[in-house]
Image: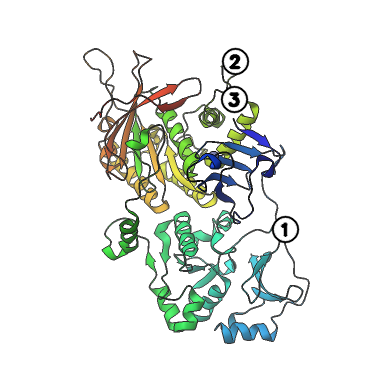
Amino acid sequence: MSKLYDSFEAAGINLSGAGDNDTVTIECPECSGTRKKKHTRSLRVTRSAGLWTCYHCQWSGAVRQDHHVPQRPTYNKPTITFESELPQAVTDYLVKERGIDPEVLTPDIIGFSPARKKIMFIYRRDGEIVNLRYRDRQKRYSQEENCEHILWDRDKITKNCELVIYEGELDKLTGDSVDPDRVHCSVPNGSNSFQFLTNSEKVLELPAKIILAGDMDAPGRKMVEELARRIGKDRCYKVTWPAGCNDANDTLLTHGADTVRQCLDDAQPWPIEGVHSPSEYIEEITELYRHGVKQGVDPGMGLGRKMRISPGCLSVGTAIPNHGKSTILNNIMVNIAKSAGWSFAVFSPEYASPAHHVRNLIQTWTVKPFTEGVPGRMSEDEAVIAIRNIDQHFHFILPEEAAPDIDTILSRAKQLIRQKDNVKGLVIDPWNKLEASRDRGQSETEYVAEVLNKLTYFAKQFGVHVWLIAHPKKMERGQDGSYVVPRPWDISGSAHFFSMADLCWTIFRHVHDPEADVEFHVQKVRDAGVDGELGVVRLKFDKDCGVYSEGEQKFEEMI
Ligand SMILES: [Zn+2]
């Protein structure tokens, strides 16, 4: 039973000491006392949305909100009303102690606040001041309240430039000092900076190359990985600073300007596909050696024994019409949103309207019927909380065109991945809605290969799992006249669906025996052990709320 509360505190949720990220995972006040490992963190709290869910006991709830939530945030615009020239002592510190070239300390990007006694970094967009960030000698930071987050010095980014993005301002100034041929910017909030991506869509399209030059510590590496995923790994390069140096300024002070430039020149592309040298995988292999194979995410309902969901993969699902392929996908997405916090970009034009789809998702989220008169109906609070969760985790792609092509859908998906947190899944349901955009003169098989190539590349480039739902070409009947389980090579159009997918599955209902369990057949697993194994999982279906749960499993059924 989930409820609305007046505040996090009123729900017994204590966020002090949880760090300052928007989404944090803490001990669950409902179930931590009853668990063997008392200090396991199982409650995911998103502060800005006022939402929480425990992936252990399923307790969820929300902070009551005004009905009038502003659509677009309004930001303060700070102004500088004082003499902000850098005092000689500060210039001396930056030049003599940190090796910065005095020429790059220009008053449009850097100043000094006499009131705060701190260096002031001036964030401008098209010349206008958007934010001010302050730093003292002890590396203590502060910034103006409620200002927009943008890249520092983004006005210098031009078409086809090479852009270097750093974690700290002094690193950016180091880049300016040693390498005037490239454009150097820094993120606005250290290793927690992703909000700037929402307003950088156009400016990040300009550079020919984007070099990510974060710190070498764990938060820095994590930030660089996530930035590459959201910007698109095909355009990003990764800098490795020399052993013992954490960042660009460290490297300058320890080894000198030539070494900093050399590190930027030597930045490595992310391995995506094609031929790569084994050395590119050293980190990944070391990780594997130390921690073993990292399995994909469990989609719940008992499916995890046969199928795991990994970023960077393509799943193809097929089924006889009305056997529930869209519903099982809703169940998989809701389970993964709850357990792993993923969000999804969804192109699903067969629903009468997004509202209709949301209604189905609300039932899946609450595991209760929506409709009045049906026993066990959800409360209004539960519906409101579910809608707010769905708003966080599901982003619908609704192109204006009647028959959008794959490029239109992928470009919308790319925007969502950049702008929204944790978009790790893309759904295209169904395939035949894309077919109308096939070129005349291109065979169906060629067209399928082209689109699937784009999807597999997109999955790897942005670290998302792509689900493609397709119809079988013909429904075969067995000797008794009932339909037989469709196989992925039966999909209308091409055997490429089977050969190019990482995972293939079908869901099958025994139409003549409504009491029988629904069968989920895993028919292809490219990376056995990591992503699952072939076989069948039996599911129960609650048609009042459209929710699947684990059925009674028979002995191992192989295909
Ligand atoms: Zn709990």
Does the Cβ of the disc 1 residue fall within 8 Å of ligand 1?
A: no
Query: Secondary structure under badge 1?
Result: loop
Q: Position of residue 101 (x, y in %)?
A: 56, 84
Of the residues shown, which amino acid type is indicated by label 3?
Met
Residue type at mark 1?
Asn
Regarding residue 361, the answer to whether it shows in the image is yes
The percent position of residue 486, horizontal first and vertical second, equals: 28, 26
Q: Which residue is mark 2?
A: 373
Q: Which residue is mark 1?
A: 76
**Residue 93's image quarter?**
bottom right
Between discs 1 and 3, the one toward the N terminus:
1
365 with respect to 515 (left or right): right
Tell whether label 2 touches label 3 (CB within 8 Å). no
Q: Is residue 439 visible?
A: no
Q: Is residue 342 above or below residue 213?
A: above
Label 1 or label 2, whichever lies nearer to me, is 2
Q: Measuring 32% from the left and 56% from the top, which residue is drawn there?
A: 288
Q: CA distance from mark 1 to mark 2?
A: 49 Å
Q: CA distance from mark 1 to mark 3?
A: 40 Å
Q: Give the answer, above or below, for where 239 lies relative to 335.
A: below
Taking the view exactly as shown, the residue that stands out farthest to the right is: 81
Query: Hey, what amino acid is under mark 2?
Result: Gly
- Circles 1, 3 touching at the beta carbon (< 8 Å): no
Where's residue 6, x and y in %? Answer: 71, 39
Q: Nearer the viewer, mark 1 or mark 3?
A: 3
Q: Nearer the viewer, residue 518 or 233?
A: 518
State the SS at label 2.
loop
- Quarter of the picture containing the C terminus is top left
Rounded to the nearest angstrom, the CA distance separating label 3 from label 2 is 11 Å
N-term mark: 1 or 2: 1
What residue did someone put label 3 on? 378
